[in-house]
């Protein structure tokens, strides 16, 4: 892998990881259309680390508040006042809700990992799934959201968003798009839907990175050249941070739907071309 390959991989990872166009779908189609080799496992680990850094920096205030809230809540739980912490501490409650919202996709991810990977090897199917992702994004134009904020998010809302996040395991379905749409449908305000989506992304991206690190440690697979890997990681972090800022601005303005036509056209062209 050259330094230019590292830049390209970093851009694809950083932009499509957070914009609602599906990183897995784009990578699957790119491998088929352009004949890209799969990046080495060491490269995948570093690229995910780059996007994880981007989201930690972008939502550092929310994350710090949640961590402090969880620490406070744990202390009150030890003293036998868990119910009081849940009632009084909004940041503790948000941390618990993020954890609960992560459980469904974690279980599903481990259960259907092999099936999802096999589906990713069928680019025509990925194209059709990408069309479905685009249709859902276009439909978001008529979703106004509700009045729930991060401080008032309900348990059922967090679980609803978490369960629908399972759909994003499919290559072609965007995780950010799915969780934001689910949040709006469940009554979250636009800003809250976007922020809760990205808070849910932290354990998701972190978990994926940890699993890749375990695979890397337990295998003797060759690694890509370190300069190219480091360049790709830096590009993934910077482009991912920019993608987060752009997406949050569009979500607040009710313009998430603008990505829909792109996904529909790209997915349709891919499916028709590959089948033909």
Image (tube, helix red, strand yellow):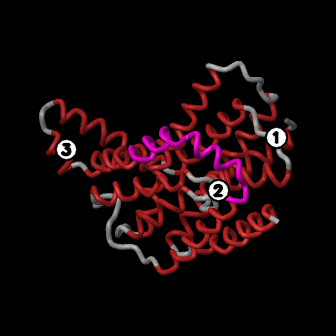
- The one of 207 and 7 positioned closer to us in this rendering: 207
Disc 1 + disc 2, Cβ < 8 Å: no
Residue bearing mark 3: 85
Residue bearing mark 2: 242
Q: Position of residue 138 (x, y in %)?
A: 57, 76
Disc 3 + disc 2, Cβ < 8 Å: no
| Residue 2 figure quarter | top right
Residue bearing mark 1: 37
What are the residue bounds of the magenta stretch? 103-125
Spatial separation of the CA atoms under disc 1 and disc 2 = 27 Å
Q: Position of residue 79 (x, y in %)?
A: 14, 31
The residue that appears at 58% across and 73% down in the rendered structure is 135
Residue 247 appears left or right of 72: right
**Magenta highlight: main SS:** helix
Q: How many marks?
A: 3
Disc 3 crowd rating (10 Å Cα; few below 14, some 14-19, many 20+) is many
The residue that appears at 40% across and 54% down in the rendered structure is 163
| Residue 15 figure quarter | bottom right
Q: Secondary structure at mark 1?
A: loop
Q: Quadrant of the C terminus?
A: bottom right
């Amino acid at each position: 892998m050259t330094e230019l390959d590292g830049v390209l991989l970093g851009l694809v990872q950083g932009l499509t990881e957070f914009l609602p166009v599906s990183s897995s779908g784009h990578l699957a189609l790119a491998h088929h259309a352009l004949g890209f080799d799969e990046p080495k496992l060491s490269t995948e680990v570093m690229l995910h680390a780059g996007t994880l850094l981007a989201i930690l920096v972008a939502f550092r205030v929310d994350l710090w508040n949640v961590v402090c809230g969880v620490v406070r809540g744990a202390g009150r739980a030890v003293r036998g006042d868990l119910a009081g912490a849940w009632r009084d501490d909004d940041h503790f409650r948000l941390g618990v809700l993020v954890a609960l919202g992560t459980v469904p996709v974690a279980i599903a991810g481990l259960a259907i990992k092999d099936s999802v990977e096999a589906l990713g090897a069928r680019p025509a199917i990925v194209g059709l799934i990408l069309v479905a992702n685009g249709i859902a994004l276009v439909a978001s134009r008529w979703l106004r959201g509700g009045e729930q904020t991060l401080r008032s998010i309900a348990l059922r809302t967090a679980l609803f968003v978490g369960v629908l996040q399972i759909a994003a395991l499919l290559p072609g379905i965007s995780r950010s798009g799915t969780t934001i749409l689910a949040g709006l449908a469940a009554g979250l305000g636009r800003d809250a839907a976007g922020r809760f989506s990205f808070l849910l992304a932290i354990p998701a991206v972190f978990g994926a990175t940890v699993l890749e690190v375990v695979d890397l440690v337990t295998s003797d697979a060759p690694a890509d050249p370190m300069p190219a890997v480091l360049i790709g990681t830096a590009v993934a972090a910077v482009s991912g941070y920019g993608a987060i800022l752009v997406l949050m601005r569009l979500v607040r303005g009710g313009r998430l739907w603008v990505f829909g036509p792109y996904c529909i056209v790209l997915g349709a062209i891919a499916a028709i071309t590959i089948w033909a």
